[in-house]
Amino acid sequence: MLLKYLFILIIPIFLFSQEVQEKQTPLIKKESVVDEQNNAESEQIILQNKLIDDVLNKINTEYYLNEEFDLDEYKEDFNLLTNKINANKRQNNILAIKRDELKLIALKENKRYQETLKQIVIAKKEYKDKQYFINLLDKNISAINKINISKYTPIYNSELTNKNHISSAFVQNYLDLTNQINSELFILEYLKTNIAKYRNTNFFIDEFNLQYFVNKIDSISGISFVSSLTSYHLKFSVGEAVVVLLIILIFRLLNTKVIAVVANLVSRVFVKESNEDSDLIKEYLRMSLDSPLIFALYTLSIQISIYILVQRTDIILKIMPWINTIYIGLLTWALYSILNNSINIYAHSLLDKYPNVRKEIISFVLKIIKFILVLLVILFLFSQLGIDIKAIAASLGVGGIAIALASKDTLANFFGSLNIMTDNSFSQGDWIKTTSIEGTVVDIRMRTTRIRTFDNAMITIPNSQLANDHIMNWSKRKIGRRIKMNIGVTYESKMEDIVNLKTDIESMLKDHPLIASEKNSQIARSRGFEAIKKEDLQGVKRTLLVYIDSFNSSSIDILVYCFSRSPNWEDWLHTKEDVLIQIAQLVEKNNCEFAYPTQAILIKNDNEIASMSNL
């Protein structure tokens, strides 16, 4: 709006000669003409100051980087005017063509002018040196001066007195373009001579920047000729190549020397105690920070090299989002490494302090956090590339049904893993048996569970299937693994000896330190109401039974039913072996013998057979 007012006010000064003014106002006195000129100049200065203040305010507030400032809106106007020009060419409407050409030139010039102001803001944020701003403004001032509006002046003079709407629009477009050019030249010249108004002077950046060293190297006798050749053919000078190599060397030295110092400093800041655990924590922190810092320094060296070698700002603007995304990715990597190593450090002490906390839950939570961090990095990458995240979210809402149907099995497996976690059906390392599989649980993942069978095969089962299956968990027991046997004693043994044997076996088992009994397998009782017996919940079995059980076909059987204290298979075998040895000793002590399968055959004489046949 200010531009429009300024254009209108400076029309009499830049466009109309004194002779035209005198013809239009022959009755005005010279004194009144001078007063009007002075008033017009005063108003012009006021509007110029307002215009400059508005531009400086937008530069300092970074308005040209806001979302509401969009240069893409010019495309529609360009296409519209181009179509109108082509249509008028087919109709041979010369004046209408010139009218639209002036409008198109004005739009293109205004777009370039706005891009220049945006580049100023970007250069300010990137701490460009003073010479960069001067070169940028000189380049655009030169481009404005090259606009050839004089070829439209004869048409303007001839159409000035015509009153039809095409002539009036042509005259207005001519005046607007002239005023726009003068106004933009005035603002750009002002910005060039008043750089301190929008950029703080920095001695080291302006005088001792990298370009300074590049120029010094390129100005050395003998190198300047080679530099001119490389600049023409390879698009970079010798000075730029030398500075880039020096930057890479410096950052290489930083990677080998400084990274370790920084990592040690960070670890000392976060861990101030001095013991074995703290040394382990410091080592994990150094491991977490080393690689991300190394890659971050290499990325920084690449970024600086790009600024040196690439002279086109538009290319730099396209590359910078990718550089920023790499920095975010490295930061995410560092955070995840610290989190992962911290969990590894504190997991063992956490499990010792809280036995109910399960290892697979810690691993599961870590995987979810990793997924969230990766998702955030992807979303940031989309935003850096100019992809509308809201549009993606909206499209996901529209296609949610299709996605849900396509990922039905994946979601079912994910919620199946949640069911397994919350139900605590089994844990990592448990020995389980389902309707079709038996083995040891290796790990519980977000979609599947892996089981190692006893013949050392790995089986992967979807969690949805496992969550709905019958699961027999042999590891969910705290005390007790069953020992059951029948001891057969011969019928030739006296019943008194058999009863004594049964009593001795029972006494031996009650006093055996590896057999679960009331003496050695007590658990703490809770004073509160218990809906579930604690023994059944924790898996405590200490039943001990020894009875003369049955008269078998070839033996009198004694039932022995008890539980080893340890549920471990190898401990159970050791306990069972010791029990068998002691039972064998007790059998011998009580004058009994182990029975073995026998069969008695009765043979009768011939008389008995004959008498039986007469019957």
Image (cartoon, rainbow, N blue to C red):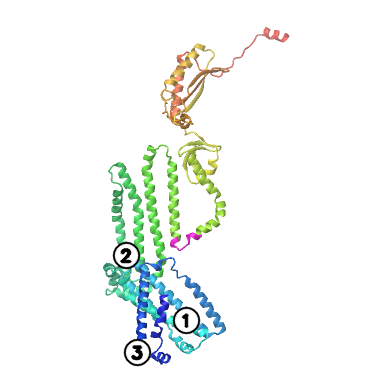
Query: For this rendering, which residue is in front, 460 or 40?
Result: 40
Query: For this rendering, which residue is in front, 578 or 291?
Result: 291
Image height of 470 relative to 251, above or below = above
Q: Position of residue 414 (x, y in %)?
A: 51, 46
Q: Amino acid at mark 2?
A: Leu
Query: For this rendering, which residue is in front, 590 or 309?
Result: 309
- Range of residues picked out in magenta: 383-391
Question: Who's the residue at 43% across and 21% down the image?
Answer: 510
Q: CA separation, marks 3 and 1?
A: 37 Å
Instruction: State whether residue 225 appears in this view.
Output: yes
Q: Earlier in the sequence, mark 3 or mark 1?
A: 3
According to the image, label 2 marks what residue? 245
Q: Amino acid at mark 1?
A: Leu
Q: Which quadrant: the N terminus? A: bottom left
Residue lying furthest right: 614
According to the image, label 1 marks what residue? 102
Q: Amino acid at mark 3?
A: Glu
According to the image, label 3 marks what residue? 31
In which quarter of the view is residue 138 placed? bottom left
Q: Which quadrant: the C terminus? A: top right
Q: CA separation, marks 3 and 2?
A: 71 Å
